[in-house]
Amino acid sequence: MARDSDAAARRRWTLVLVNLASVLEKADEVLLPAVYKEVGAALGASPTALGSLTLCRALVQTACYPLAAYASARHDRARVVAVGAFLWAAATFLVAVSGTFLQMAISRGLNGIGLALVIPAINSLVADYTDDHTRGAAFGWLQMTCNLGSILGGSFGVLLAPVAFLGVPGWRLAFHAVAAVSVAVGALMWLFAADPRGKSSKAAATSATDEAKELLREARRVLGVPTFQIIVAQGIAGSIPWSALNFSAMWLELVGFTHWETSVITGLYLFATALGALFGGVVGDLVARRFPNAGRIALAQISSASALPLGAILLLALPNDPSTGVVHAVVFFIMGFAISWNASSTNKYDAHRILHCKYSTTLYVFLCFIAHC
């Protein structure tokens, strides 16, 4: 009985901490796009050059996903998340003190290493700590906390950017603050979170070469599953508009919206995506019980189909006029809620179900790797 109680407490602590790490991971990721305007003015960079900073981070992050698979296979995944948090915190601090565009690009690239370690490990921990009847809701909560991190990071950056403290620009202070909190979260993960696999002697008994060969065999097994291939194809197509929406704050400001109006609109959009992710996960579990073979897939198709008309309304039908803030906010909210069901309701659940749980980290590494590519 005591052992079961300890295991339940460990599970709760780990799930709480990985969700907290997701908040910081996403806040760190969106902070730079939220302050593009101020960073561009400080470094003399054009919007195209600023976009290349995000590209630099994404390229490094993509290249480091195999490292994430290797680390998570040989080590405690909770510790991997903690190390990733320390790494992205250090890189975020370097972003805050960067004085040239080159320094910013290098720092942002280093940031991708920590993010690559964290994201697959978090997803596989959540998947392994839940069962088929609760996994959708668990991923819904995880996606919701990620989106809340986007709200906090984006709003924090936008609101702090135009001010200064003791001569330090607000956008630099925002990066310092996120770095400090990330260190604290990493320490909590290191001390209190646990991997459900427990301590394994496999890492000590297997050479690095043999482990790398095993990871390659796992990769071939994962890539050979047709359902996984379809999920990846949908993810590649679906990630393009999501990436474009990273520039929504800058776009709204260039249209003429104030910092406060931009913060409210983007905050509502991100809050809507958080609600949509939770809705997708919970409803996905419900419809899967009633329609086990088609419920989740139908839900994902509805969500995907809604993106095109809502995107057309936002970009083509609405005027580029800052006096239409309420209308922009409503469309952003509806769009955010409707297009955010797929990952929690279908993709992550089905991807984990079709493969043995021992491949969970490799599975999520490939989902992240191919989507970023």
Image (cartoon, rainbow, N blue to C red):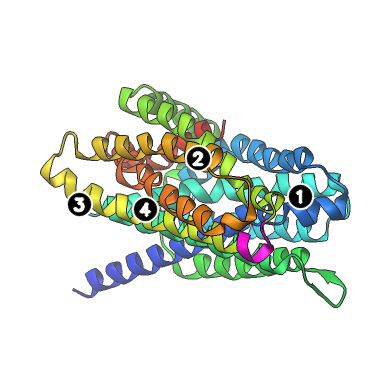
Which sits in the foreground, 12 or 1? 12
Image marks 4 and 2: residues in contact by CB distance under 8 Å: no
Residue at 40% over, 64% down: 14
Res 197 visible: no
Crowd class of label 1 (few under 14; some 14 to 19; many from 20; radius 10 Å) = many
Residue 314 drawn at (x, y percent): 51, 43
Q: Earlier in the sequence, mark 1 or mark 4?
A: 1
What range of the chain is rendered magenta? 257-262
Magenta segment, prevailing SS (helix, strand or loop): helix
- Which residue bears the numbered disc 1? 107
The amino acid type found where label 1 is placed reads: Ser
Which numbered disc flags the more N-terminal residue, 2 or 3? 2
Q: Earlier in the sequence, mark 1 or mark 3?
A: 1
- Name the amino acid type tagged 4: Gly
Give the CA distance from mark 1 to mark 3. 42 Å
Q: From mark 2 to mark 1, how far is it between C-alphas?
A: 23 Å
The crowd level at tag 4 (other Cα within 10 Å; few <14, some 14-19, many 20+) is many
Q: Residue 52: where, in percent of width, then height?
A: 73, 38
Residue at position x 80%, y 49% in the image? 104
User: Which sits in the foreground, 71 or 281?
Assistant: 281
Residue 133: which disc?
3
- What residue did someone put label 2 on? 69
Residue 276, numbered label: 4
Image point (66%, 47%), residue name = 251
The first of marks 3 and 4 along the sequence is: 3
